[in-house]
Image (cartoon, rainbow, N blue to C red):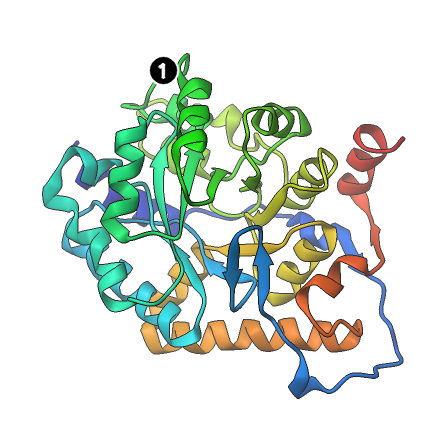
Amino acid sequence: MTRSERKIDHIRHALGHERAYHNHFDDVEIVHQSLARLDFNQLSIETQVGELHLSSPLFVNAMTGGGGEETKEINRNLALAASKTGIGMAVGSQMSAIKNPEERSTYEVVREVNPEGVIFANVGSEATVPQAEEAVDMLKADGLQIHINTLQELIMPEGDRDFSHRLRRIEEIVSKMSIPVIVKEVGYGMSKETVETLYSMGVRYIDVGGQGGTNFSKVENMRRATPLSSFNNWGIPTPISILESSSVSPDLHIIASGGVRHGLDGVKGLILGGKAFGMAGGLLRVLVEEGEEALVNEICHIHEEIKIAMMLLNASNIHDLSHNPYILFGRTKEWSDQRLSP
């Protein structure tokens, strides 16, 4: 199977596989505040994530590209929706275009239709500095994601097996790039030990990419003759990953992603310690099933949910959400008690 065919395969399986029976954002309950005292029309959802100024805490997280015309059309429509709603967007791994220039247009279309938007380039942790620079130049990107996906690669029939140069290459890219470098997981979450190591290497932007959304163990197992199904539930749920990451250092910029279903989940991610949140599979499903106009409406709906939650919590801006109280239940509370309590 070619890399391009694999990209299409991933989209098909990602849209088709069953989600986890329990989403751990349901283990988080925000404490309601009855005495609203703000003007809804004066609320601001702009946010600052380190050097990145975003008009919304929501952005379209990495999904696709490198799979010919089908992925080009998906990226075009995602970028159009992002442009119309003023949100940021990340592309899927650009390693396919770096290795096969014929695939460049499937990524370049994002900047073509959204010339003023905030766009994140994306490479794997195997990338060299020149490859990272090529990915950024391809999109005139505002930031660079480096995705780490060890378990996906190990389950993938044609996946990588040698990760011995990963840390050195990440550190080199972080030290050489002039734009923010975001290290992200792809659905398995991040532990505080992982984040501590990344922090020691100079990483200041973390996308936790927690368990709860697209499950790449299941996606890759659907492509195997003999599935490694014992790893289908491996990973750290997103709310727990946010808490783990936030415990490392106050000058980390945490992005919540993985299983964010709606604006209220996003707000929970912000209250737990995130400064922005990414959505991928849920937005892709709306686009594929209902079209680009429906996706624009969905993003506007998520923005309304964010502002309603802000109004209920007397948060005039996104930063104010971080000061609001919450209660943990279930596995999330048990994990927090055992791993994060003093």
The residue at the point 15 percent across, 45 percent down is: 103
Query: 47 left or right of 69?
Result: right
Split into 4 quadrants, where in the image is the C terminus? top right
Q: Position of residue 134 (x, y in %)?
A: 24, 39
Residue 35 appears in view:
yes
Among the 4 quarters of the image, the one containing residue 337: top right
The residue at the point 26 percent across, 30 percent down is: 130
Label 1 amino acid? Arg
Residue at numbered disc 1? 161
Q: Nearer the viewer, residue 81 or 180?
A: 180
The residue at the point 83 percent across, 29 percent down is: 338
Q: Position of residue 25 (x, y in %)?
A: 68, 52
Among the 4 quarters of the image, the one containing residue 313: bottom right
Split into 4 quadrants, where in the image is the N terminus? top left
Among the 4 quarters of the image, the one containing residue 43: bottom right
- Where 301 falls versus 222 (above or below)? below
Residue 148 appears in view:
no
Q: Position of residue 287 (x, y in %)?
A: 35, 66
Q: Position of residue 290 (x, y in %)?
A: 35, 72
